[in-house]
Image (cartoon, coloured by chain):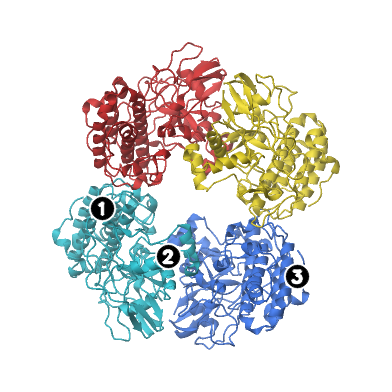
Chain colours: A yellow, B red, C cyan, D blue
């Protein structure tokens, strides 16, 4: 693959400042840098319906810019190829028919090179729009959207490469060393009471957030404590050794059916004392956070551990520093998150954010008085509000600067190809 | 089938008083009265995995009494047939292996007559336990359990009979006449604030409730209004006529996939201007509440109507009379509910309870500090807390006296073989 | 269930002589006698799509008489119930739409009693037609059709009862004693040459046969030998013990996929040293013929034994006595076949016919110059001529007198709920 | 992709003479020439379980040479990569476990370049074996095997490219012009009698054939006639226009289920008056042979046309010139077959061979006294002898020189991604 167009753009996203043009360049070039180690065929394959080819991600984010920014806002713009929206629209019903999701892996054409040409064309065409302040919300949505696909590109290709019996790595290299020593688990305590939850959609200084993160509203918390460390691989090995996957008393009914229907006996990507990473098969670090677990597994582990999952409200209250012991808010840009294209591994840090998305016991539902955005971009979040659970934080594959305290990630309870883990909570 | 053993027992459950012996007789005889119109083969068939044969319900509730009361609490009791637990256990993992759910419809043996003999045997054996006050909680759980299966017996046989192309009724007779005239829709308003939600598990006077209904806890409500009438068949016909089932903008993403994957174009049991009832195919009453809709349909309708579903907390606050206009609490034993074996039809009344279970937008999740009961009966509720939505109220097939303000019924968002309907809510 | 209408009719079919009226009475009453031990619910259940409820068999054969004889040939006849053809047509496209095959088990209505009333009505109405010689071919087709369903009734209810975890028998009683002693296996030898195969459709004295059994035609055989005994349970146990089900070299590719996809490790209905019979679970007789095997299993066994399956032509040549050692033709009415309602078990005899249908290695395809019959009855055989294999002989559940040398039974290579077994052949 | 290693090797296979070394070079280089127009990602995708990626074909045939020739016959040879047999074995159980068939499309690694290196390595290593006359049978099997995969490479990539909504061609160019004018349909007549069928496995001069083509044996034919032209697109359009796909009377029962279960309404790759070809979407030539039909469709068409399919024996008798009017044998190397890498299209010629494989009504079963070859190569044919039908001739994608009169191609009755068509037969 081609190198990213601009070396200057390699600065981590959260450091490039508030200029839309710089942020645009940083975002676009990171996507290409992430795909750079992939061969044409690596970028084409699709290993399951939940995942998309890397090539498709490269194109889909470009379709987003071309559709919602260029087509809708740039006078006289004509589509680069009028057949491509059919193949690169993801799920926007208002934008018409599209290729079946499980057929994305058949797209040997257009090639990566053709898509990179399209990207360059769109990047060029976008320049005049990056000065138009009234488009800022939509442009910031475009950044957030492309960042989400950067993470998906990594988790999707990880899944695909893992299915290759020959072993296949995206990057070389041993895992990075952890910074600092992890201590014993402690607990951040919260006395309960009314907490302010969600993004303040009326505050123009509050920065970008997705529609589903608001409106800000009050919620009532009971006293609780949240663990100050993530659950580790070593702890999970104890759970396995103690018969965690064979004891129905620990599991939700749907979870028990999932375990037995899919012969699940460990987190995904585990074999013996190794796990599959974007750097290939590697020894598991017992002190690193466990990842690639489903909600069902997270819930069963918490039950086994005599604890529970936090609610999304509890987690956010801790993140915002709204708790009794006057601890400050946690830094959403802290911990092990993605700064540039290169090895991606959960390590374990003292931060609340980073390493892995953390399951909460909260269903992904609308906040009081939630209204989806108007038009096709209104399909971004609201229509997914059934059957999924909220995850908080950020993972080692999340672009630093992308997440925040009010961020609501969401997945079905059986899904686990993301860097998903857990942080225990308990009543006090 | 045999007649119910005791004519005296035909008094409606909620009128028989607090004596366990009387309640036991009333409960057991109602089950048999409900099954009485069914032939041996009606009672044997199973039309889908969600539903069970009527014969199986007759037996399963008896297994519950025999297992958790007689076996565990009556000295010297020996099982009536030691092979039957394998076929009549529903889902209690702690009670061992059991027949696959979808194979219940193959149980031509034992016959209904054999099961009625077992019922009589267990009823007789139960008598000495009905004086033991320390067993009251477990016995009341047995009543509630058998009442749930009374409702399921009706909805399951309705589904099975509906699949018979020859038409097949359980009872003769036109629908009952509605009492009183239904007015135009008004709204019960609530100013918001802290509401006390759930059953007070610490209050010994509070009566029976399932474990999932507690603990009682505070929750914060925003101002809202709840409709004082259910959505009707006539209103639903307008939704259909307006393209409700063909407009993706109205639907949750999973709902839209469900509509298209199952060619859904109306509530279940509709054909032209008729619907299937336990009294066979009958003309639909446009003023009667719509029933047999899924959560997906309820949500799409509310969106179409410019309203939304209430949360379970809002609904309960109205039920308890915790609202501004000093309206009293609603009577959980009011409205169109089941009093005795005979025609079952939604009619429409002014009551909050009755006619149909009402979807809320709340996921079925544990209340703060919820702990499942110990032992096998702890599998009753907690393990189902993923992927389902809460319904409130009571239906025309719910035994009067069974439900209450804190009652939480729950189903998956695609299920609709229960008498399910909706009552709109809105922000104010 | 009611008793069969006429005790006189209990004479075995092949002894009642050529009178249509007597044959009709014998056929109709045997069907009812076979169903007599079944409860209403036994007669209603359906355990897989390949099988039908006993009640449905009772009705379907009656539909055949009513449709093709009464409706089409009796002036002024009106249908007993005009909705019933929809539920009791099996697969005749020319006769219109019909209930989905897998939904036959939901027909709790009409009841067995209602169907017996219909049967009596049709039997009465048929009387004047039984004198009309021009209808003889169609009436004889009706006998053959009903006899096929008598066998299916037995094999279908066997499958259904076997799925009941409580064990369930249709008749009491130990297996009958075998007549005579089985000797060591010998071989009937055939020198090869031109054989006349198939029913002589032009010979009016030749008696009834299905259209697919003709036209008679010449075929060329190589020298071969056919075993004079069926393969036994004891021999099959050796095959199992020798790893027969775990050695892919013995299996057809599709067979190996079937074994592994369905965890097949023995004939159907085996557990330890027992097998399920219409008389319940019983000890297996090692000297009795193995039954309930698929084509895949028969082929694998033959490969293991260093032999092969005969072709249908070889088998028929032996049956007709067209071989070198001047042995006479075998008696199609000999061996262990069905004479009356009562216990049904493979025993082992010296006869070529009886005990079990015998797999051949011949695909079920049209004979040269085959033409299906005109009209709906032309759908009887020809349209099934892809993907199935021919079986010859007759089983312990076949009405004696039903089969003949040219008879071609046929099933898919994975099916084994019939009394299917094998007789080895080899090249010489 | 790289160019084929040797331009000299571009001579058509059937002209290179009997030298193993020349044939080897021609075969190997043609495979690479066929894959040359494909991008890395074209060569990687897999569009259904029946089809394999082009890259996999390149590798699998190489695995065949390495395994059965080099490993088993070249002293001291070590495998190029010991992990590759797991991914490039197709179905040889004796050669151990292998990747699931439907996962071949996930093999982004090894790359095409790596596989071409392997091919070069194996080609080099093979040289000393090409002089060893005792290996001739195995080497000729290797040629035949690789030629089969050349055809599969073309039909598999055609299927994959057809699923790309953007349209995708392998080669440019309009279809070639037909040579000569097609006349009206005539019939080759055969008087019946004993025909010698199959390859003479005992004749050392007879040349290579697969084991399933023998032993040569006598078969008895009835008088018949075989059409001297293939059925055309134009004729098929008449069939469609006449309701061919909506009239159950024309179809086998399994075929009718297949039509309705898959919404089949035309041959594969048709849309309006175009069809998809390896040269992209093109106008259909009404005079060209219809292709991409299933056995079910071929049989229904023949029924509609008042004719039937030939048996494989009839077809072979005509091919060998064993018929009354003293016509000579047909040339197996005649007609429209594959000579070199380039556009592939059915055209229509006067030849018996070429354009498309022709369905027969014969099931693919063993000939009398057939014995599979010993060892793993014995899995080549015999284990597929259930459920499939024989096709005769050769297609426009078959390497000229590959087929012969005794050749037996075989597919399941629903498959149609090969160039499959039909030639009518009738009784006379």
Give the number of the mark in front: 3 or 1.
Answer: 3
| Residue C216, position as x, y percentages in the image | 35, 78
Question: In the rendered image, is residue B262 in sight?
Answer: no
Label 1 resides on the chain identified as C
For marks 1 and 2 on the same chain, the one whose residue lies earlier in the sequence: 1
- Would you place residue D178 above or below residue A301 in this image? below
Q: Residues within 10 Å of mark 3 (few under 14, many from 20)?
A: some
Q: Are marks 3 and 2 on the same chain?
A: no
| Mark 3 and mark 2: Cα distance apart in space | 45 Å
Q: Secondary structure at mark 2?
A: loop
Residue that numbered label 3 is attached to: D4
Give the number of the mark in front: 1 or 2.
Answer: 2
Residue C78 is marked as: 1
| Residue C120, position as x, y percentages in the image | 20, 54
- Would you place residue C32 above or below residue B246 in this image? below
Which quadrant does the C terminus of chain A fall into?
Answer: top right
Question: In the rendered image, is residue B117 in sight?
Answer: yes
State the residue in front, A220 or D52.
Answer: A220
Label 3 resides on the chain identified as D
State the residue in front, A28 or A226.
Answer: A226
Q: Quadrant of residue D343?
A: bottom right
Residue that numbered label 2 is attached to: C413
Q: What is the total number of numbered labels drawn onto the structure image?
A: 3
Q: Secondary structure at mark 3?
A: loop
- Would you place residue B111 above or below residue B68 in this image? below
> Residue pushed farthest right?
A8
| Mark 1 and mark 2: Cα distance apart in space | 42 Å
């Amino acid at each position: 693959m081609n190198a990213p167009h601009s070396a200057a753009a390699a600065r981590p996203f959260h450091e490039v400042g508030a200029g839309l043009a710089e942020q645009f360049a940083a975002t676009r070039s990171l996507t290409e840098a992430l795909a750079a180690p992939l061969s044409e065929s690596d970028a084409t394959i699709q290993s399951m319906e939940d995942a998309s080819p890397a090539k498709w991600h490269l194109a889909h984010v470009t379709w987003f810019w071309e559709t919602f920014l260029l087509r809708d806002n740039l006078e006289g713009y004509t589509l680069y190829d009028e057949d491509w929206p059919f193949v690169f629209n993801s799920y926007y019903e208002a934008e018409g028919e599209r290729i079946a999701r499980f057929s994305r892996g058949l797209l040997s054409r257009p090639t990566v090179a053709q898509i990179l040409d399209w990207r360059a064309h769109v990047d060029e065409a976008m320049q005049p729009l990056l000065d138009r302040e009234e488009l800022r919300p939509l442009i910031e949505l475009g950044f957030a959207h492309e960042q989400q696909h950067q993470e998906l590109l990594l988790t999707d290709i990880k899944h695909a490469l893992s299915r290759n019996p020959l072993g296949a790595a995206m990057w070389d290299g041993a895992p990075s060393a952890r910074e600092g020593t992890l201590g014993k688990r402690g607990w951040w305590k919260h006395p309960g009471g009314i907490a302010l939850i969600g993004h303040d959609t009326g505050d123009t200084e509050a920065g970008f957030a997705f529609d589903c993160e608001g409106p800000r509203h009050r919620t009532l918390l009971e006293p609780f404590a949240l663990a100050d460390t993530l659950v580790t691989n070593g702890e999970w090995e104890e759970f396995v050794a103690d018969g965690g996957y064979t004891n129905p008393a620990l599991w939700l009914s749907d979870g028990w059916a999932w375990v037995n229907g899919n012969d699940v006996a460990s987190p995904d990507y585990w074999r013996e004392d190794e796990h599959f990473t974007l750097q290939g098969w590697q020894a598991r670090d017992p002190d690193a956070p466990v990842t690639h677990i489903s909600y069902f597994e997270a819930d069963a582990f918490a039950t086994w551990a005599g604890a529970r999952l936090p609610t999304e409200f509890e987690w956010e209250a801790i993140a915002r520093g709204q708790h009794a012991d006057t601890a400050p808010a946690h830094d959403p840009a802290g911990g092990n998150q993605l700064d540039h294209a290169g090895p991606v591994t959960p390590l374990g840090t003292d931060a609340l954010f980073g390493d892995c998305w953390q399951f909460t016991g909260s269903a992904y539902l609308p906040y009081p008085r939630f209204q989806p955005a108007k038009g096709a971009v209104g399909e971004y979040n609201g229509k997914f509000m059934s059957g999924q659970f909220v995850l908080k934080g950020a993972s080692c594959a999340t672009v630093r600067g992308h997440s925040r305290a009010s961020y609501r990630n969401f997945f079905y309870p059986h899904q686990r190809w993301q860097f998903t883990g857990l942080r225990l909570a308990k009543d006090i």
